[in-house]
Image: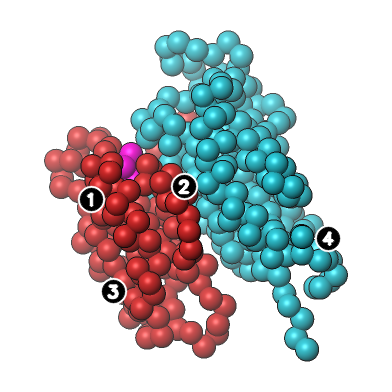
Chain colours: A red, B cyan
């Protein structure tokens, strides 16, 4: 086996940011590219609708990561219901598992894509576990 | 009248978007597997990330394992629960007339599509030397259970291939060519728009 390359960072991402609308007139940042450049893996949330069992499965995974030294954030969309993140459902599911919601960033659509990419990059750069926790799990 | 163009959806193994899900020492990328993601997005596929059955079952600090170790009633029941969680989304796309494909992880005991890992006598203390397992043709346990769930729902078999991440030594260039061949064949095989009715 080769040296493990994982980034120890995970972003919960709204479906519309993983699969953005194909509208040439809609200015939007390439969220996956920004996440990749900051070593974030993606945990894709489903689109709006009833996804009770799937959200429970996702909450189990969030709990597992949070318990073992991974930094978690959530990336949603301003002006979408619950930012496209099923925020209320996730809050209840995570509370049931003794976990809090991760820090959240809201991308704005329809503004300068490059500016939004920079806002997202600045948010991501600000988040990681305390150094002692990083050492405990990652070294 | 502008013809309706069914969208294209790629079901992708969880770790192709999130390498943190890999077993210890198994992550080859910090974030996502960009050659796969780029190839699919370039061809207009929406991405639908499958759950990672191993992470949800045995956690982030699990040992490596082969097919036979995951071929247990408890793990299959777990995979069936995950399949029931994600199948409604897949069914929605298929019944809407979307072209749906599956990109798994060749060599994986769970997510293998063309190949899985095998060593019937593995067990006990995990101190086996490197590459001390066999790669054999066949599905992983998770893909078997996912396909069974889709069949139970009366859905057609989904065209599938695997990215060779768990084949021992991954040759990224060869894997990229292999994936491109699969996707190009799909494009040639896809009937003209509107020729194929949606599922009832």
Residue named by callout 2: A53
Residue named by callout 4: B189
Q: Residue at coordinates 52% horizontally, 46% vertically from top-left?
A: B85
Which contiguous range is marked in magenta?
A: A62-66
Q: Using the rendered image, report if marks 1 and 4 lie on a common chain.
A: no
Label placed on residue A100: 1
Disc 4 packing (10 Å; few <14; some 14–19; many ≥20): few
A39 with respect to B165 (left or right):
left
Image quarter of the C terminus of chain A: top left
Residue B129: x and y, percent?
49, 17
Q: From the image, state whether disc 3 or disc 1 is nearer to you.
A: 1
Decide: marks 2, 4 in contact (CB < 8 A)?
Answer: no
Residue named by callout 3: A119
Q: Using the rendered image, report if marks 2 and 3 lie on a common chain.
A: yes
Regarding residue A80, the answer to whether it shows in the image is yes
Decide: marks 3, 4 in contact (CB < 8 A)?
Answer: no
Query: Which SS class for mark 3?
Result: helix
């Amino acid at each position: 086996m080769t040296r493990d390359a994982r980034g120890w960072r995970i972003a919960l991402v709204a479906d519309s940011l993983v699969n953005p609308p194909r509208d040439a007139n809609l200015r939007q940042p390439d969220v996956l590219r920004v996440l990749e450049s900051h070593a974030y893996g993606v945990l894709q949330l489903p689109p709006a609708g009833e996804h009770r069992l799937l959200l429970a499965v996702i909450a189990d995974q969030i709990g597992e990561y949070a318990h073992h030294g991974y930094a978690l954030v959530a990336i949603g969309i301003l002006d979408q219901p619950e930012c496209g993140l099923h925020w209320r459902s996730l809050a209840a599911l995570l509370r049931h598992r003794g976990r809090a919601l991760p820090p959240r960033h809201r991308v704005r659509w329809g503004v300068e894509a490059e500016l939004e990419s920079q806002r997202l990059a600045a948010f991501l750069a600000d988040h990681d576990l305390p150094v002692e926790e990083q050492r405990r799990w990652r070294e | 009248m502008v013809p309706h163009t069914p969208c294209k959806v790629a079901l992708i193994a969880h770790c192709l978007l999130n390498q943190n899900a890999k077993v210890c020492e198994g992550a080859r990328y910090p974030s996502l597997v960009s050659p796969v993601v780029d190839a699919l997005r370039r061809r207009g596929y929406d991405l639908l990330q499958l759950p990672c059955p191993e992470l949800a079952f045995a956690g982030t600090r699990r040992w490596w394992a082969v097919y036979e170790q995951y071929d247990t009633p408890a793990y299959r029941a777990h995979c069936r629960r995950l399949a029931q969680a994600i199948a409604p989304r897949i069914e929605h796309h298929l019944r809407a007339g979307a072209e749906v494909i599956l990109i798994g992880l060749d060599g994986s005991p769970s997510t293998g599509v063309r190949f899985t890992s095998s060593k019937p006598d593995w067990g006990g203390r995990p101190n086996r030397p490197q590459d001390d397992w066999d790669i054999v043709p066949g599905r992983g346990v998770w893909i078997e259970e996912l396909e069974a769930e889709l069949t139970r729902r009366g859905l057609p078999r989904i065209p599938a291939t695997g990215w060779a991440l768990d084949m021992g030594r991954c040759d990224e260039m060869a894997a990229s060519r292999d994936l491109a061949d699969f996707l190009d064949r799909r494009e040639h095989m896809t009937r003209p728009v509107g020729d194929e009715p949606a599922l009832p």
